[in-house]
Every structure is written in C-alpha cells, then in structure tokens.
Amino acid sequence: MSTRAAIRPRPLDINKQLLIVKDVSELDEQTQGGENGSQTAEGHGHGHGGHGGHGNQKGKLKAIPIPDIREVETHYRDYLPLFNAPVTYLHGKGVGGNKEPDPVEYDLDNEDEDWLKTYNLGRSRLNDVLFEKMLYKLELACAEATDNALSAAGAGPAERTAASAVAAIDHLPRHDAVRILVYECGGREKICQDVYNYWASKRKKWGKPIMRRLQAPTPCSDTNPYNTFRVRDKVNRPQTRRRRDNSDELMDKLRQLRDNLQGAKQILEEVVRRERRKRDLACTEIELLRIQYRSRHEVKMSQEQISTEGLNNLRERIRINGQADQM
C-alpha cells in the first residue's frame, strides 16, 4: 500500500528553458503531450496503489493555469531579427542634463544681503543662491579678462598680480558681463544689469576683488593688522653652518687625527705600566721591612722559615704582577 502523494499533472523542470513559439498550434501540441504524459503516470500510480488510491486523494492538486496568448501581427515588422548580443556590458553615458553644477566659492556678506533685501522689496525677483552665482561668475570673468589683457600687453607675472591690476574692472565691458550672466545664470537681462551695477560699485568701493583668492597678496610694509596673509621677507642671513665636503684635505686631517689618538693611547698604556712597577717596588720594600722587623724582634723564628716565607711572598707578588702585565 503506497503512502506517496499523487503525481503532479504537469511536473516542472527548473532547468528547462522557456518555450518561444511562433504559432499557437505549437503550444497546443506541447500542452497535449504534457497531459498525455501526466495521465500515463497517473494510471501507473493507480495500478501500484491498488486499494489505497482513495485514501491518498484527500485533496486533488490543481493544475497549473495556462496563460492566455495574444498574437501580435506586427511583431516581425517592428522587431527585425538583426539583434546580436553585445560581448561587454552596456554603460550609461552622462549627458548635459545630468551634469552636476559647478560649486560657487563666494558667500554673501551683510552688505550683499541688505542690497538683495532692498532689491526684492518683499517679492521674489532674485534669490540668494542665484545672486551668489552671479557675483561669482562676474569675479571670474573679470579676473580672466584682466589677465588676458595684461598678457597681451606683455606684462609679467608680478605686474599681473599687482594690487592695482587685480582691482581694475575696465577690461570687462558692461555688455560682455551682462551677456555672461544671461548665459551662465539664466536670469533676465534687467536683473543682470542691476547685479552688474551693484558689483561694479562694490568693487570700486573696496578697491580690490570681493573674492579673497583673487585679491593681491598683502605687502610686507602694510601696518594694518586686519590685512593678513603677508608674504614673508627673505632676509639675507649669514651661513652659520659650514658645508662639509668629502675632500682630500679633509681625509688627510682625519688620518692625522687618528695617528695622534693612537699615539696618545700608547703613551697612556706605558704610563699605566710604569705606575704598576712603582706599586710593586713599594710593596717589595714594605715586605722587606717586615722581614727585617721579624728577624730582629722575633728571636724564636728561625732564619730558614723567614727566608722561605719571604721567598713565597715574593713569588706570589711576581705572579700577580705578570698577570697584570699580560692584561
């Protein structure tokens, strides 16, 4: 008696590719073949199941629904069979609309904010972001026009970065500046003209560019403590440290110094040896005096014992001195 569940009417094969048919009749043939196979397998299952067929059929499995197919008549005209799969992956290319805007390096100060507030008068004629961008573009355009004009006139780098040169706005005409603002910022021409007038008046009032990196470096003679970023003075300091080169004269001096040190070492060794001899002589005289004292005041001690003791002491002293000399 089999306890296995009923076989699916249409078993699925996960490794089988999806069928692409050109006609509905081909799909019907595939469906009929699958149903016949399932019926055959089902019949075998009943034959083996015997009396236990009804006990296993607690709930009949539902067949997989077949989706509807709608034939597109213009498919082969719309999609020609000319496609070839590429070898590499497809990469998207950036276009002008996806380009990130350039960062604006200028920030509005209190004077700019007051003018913008007065210019708008409660209306949104010009926002602060666009105003910053306009002033930034005017600064860059003026700096570029001044540099080109001075370079064409043959000016050097020092003349192009002078305070009077970077403060001039005569090299950027009014119509060119308005045209640049209209092209770069997209504002109305009347607003661009008003912004240019404010920028020109502020430049004349300051006497220098309103962007810090475009301003001329502060001269060293300027005593104003608020003007920072001065260029350090190049003081002509005397050379305090001599340059040591590996020359023949220097090598001769080093050899002479080595010979002098070796000679001093030999002299010191001889002095040490002399002092040791003096010490041995003094010790020998002391021992002789002790022996004379004993020979005179110790009558009971025989002359032979005294001689033997003195000889042993002398030998021991000689042995110790010889070891010291070898060291």
Image (cartoon, rainbow, N blue to C red):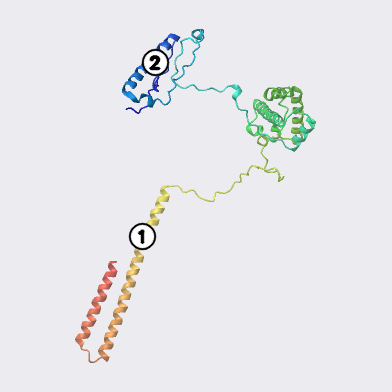
C-beta proximity under 8 Å, tags 1 and 2 = no
Disc 2 marks which residue? 35
Q: Residues within 10 Å of mark 1 (few under 14, many from 20)?
A: few
Which amino acid type is shown beneath numbered disc 2? Answer: Glu
Task: Determine whether 71 is above or below 221 in the image.
Answer: above
Q: Nearer the viewer, mark 1 or mark 2?
A: 2
Residue in view at x 36 percent, y 66 percent: 268
Residue in view at x 27 percent, y 91 percent: 297
Mark number displayed over residue 262: 1
Mark number displayed over residue 97: none
User: Residue 167 appears in which quarter of the rendering?
Assistant: top right
* Quadrant that contains the C terminus: bottom left
> Residue 91: x and y, percent?
50, 23
Which amino acid type is shown beneath numbered disc 1? Answer: Gln
Mark 1 or 2 closer to N-term?
Answer: 2
Name the side, left or right, on which 251 lies relative to 79. left
User: Residue 52 appears in which quarter of the rendering?
Assistant: top left
